[in-house]
Image (cartoon, rainbow, N blue to C red):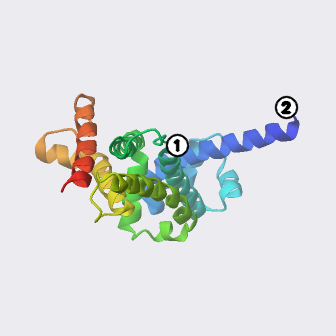
Amino acid sequence: MTASSERRRDKERTRAEILDVAAAEFAERGLNGARVDEIAARTRTTKRMIYYYFGGKKQLYMAVLERAYTRIRAAEQAVEVDHLDPVAAIRRIAEVTFDHHEAHPEFIRLVSIENIHHADHLAELTSLVDLSMPAIQLLDGILKAGWDAGLFRTDVDAVDVHMMISAYCFFRVANRHSFGALFGRDLVDPGVREHYRGMLGDMVVSYLTAR
C-alpha cells in the first residue's frame, strides 16, 4: 500500500469516527445544544481538525443527517425481492425498515429533532431527494406486480406504503418511553420483538389486499 493510499484510509477512518461521535452528540442534544469541543474530546482529533474536515458545526450536522439517510436508503436498496411474490416482497421491505429503525435509534432522534425545527436542514440536503427515489421505485415495482396479479388495491401508491411502514417503525422506537410510561409495555422488549415485526407485515399486507 502506498503512503498516499494509507493517508487516504486514515482520513476516511477519522472522518467516520467523527461522524459516529457527532451522530450520538447531535441525537442527544440537537444542533444548538451539541458541542464540537465534546465531539473532539471523544475522538482522536481536535476541534480544528473537525472544522478542517467539515467546515463548521452546521456542516457537520448536515453530514450526520445525510449519512443517516444514506444508510437507511442503502439498506432498502440492498433488499433482494425479485424472486419473491408481491405479498412476500412487501413484507420483506417492511421487515428491513423495522430492523433498521430498531438498530439505529440515533436516526429516530435526529429525524425527531429535524421535525421540531420544520426540517429546515433536511430541506437544504437536496441530494436526499434523489437518494430516496430508488426506494420509492422499488416499492412502486412491487405494487405494480401486485396490481397485475390482482392482489393489491389500486388506490394507494408507493409513498403511501412507505409512510405506513415508516410510521409504525418510527413510533415503536421514538415513543418507546412515553408508551411504556402510559401502558407499562416496552415496545422494544426482545421478548415481543417478533410479535411486533410480524404485526407490521400483517398490517401492511392486510391493507393492500383488502377488498
Mark 1: which amino acid? Ala
Position in image of residue 122 (x %, y %)? 49, 66
Query: Which one is in front, 156 or 102?
Result: 156
Where is residue 8 drawn, in percent x and y?
78, 43
Q: Is residue 99 left or right of residue 4?
A: left
Q: Quadrant of the C terminus?
A: bottom left
Question: Which residue in the protein does label 2 denote?
Answer: 1
Residue lying at 39% horizontally and 45% vertically, measured from the top left = 93
**Which one is in front, 178 or 205?**
205
Q: Identify the residue position indicated by label 1 in the image.
A: 78
Q: Secondary structure at mark 2?
A: loop
Q: Quadrant of residue 139?
A: bottom left
Residue 53 visible in image: yes
Position of residue 130 in the picture relative to residue 184 (left or right): right
Q: Position of residue 180 (x, y in %)?
A: 18, 43
Residue located 22% across and 34% down the image: 195
Tell me the element at label 1. Answer: loop
**Disc number lying in front (1 or 2):** 1
Above or below, 55 relative to 200:
below
Amino acid type at image mark 2: Met
User: Residue 55, image x and y in percent?
Assistant: 67, 62
Above or below, comparing residue 35 to residue 124 in the picture? above
Q: Indicate the quadrant containing the N terminus: top left, top right, bottom left or bottom right.
A: top right
Identity of the residue drawn at 30% across and 54% down: 150
Q: Is residue 70 above or below residue 155?
A: above
**10 Å crowding of disc 2: few (<14), some (14-19), many (20+):** few
Dot placed on the residue nearer the N-terminal end, 1 or 2 = 2
Give how far apart the Cα atoms at labels 1 and 2 are: 30 Å
Which of the two residues, 73 or 51, is positioned nearer the viewer here?
73
Residue drawn at (45%, 42%) of the image: 81
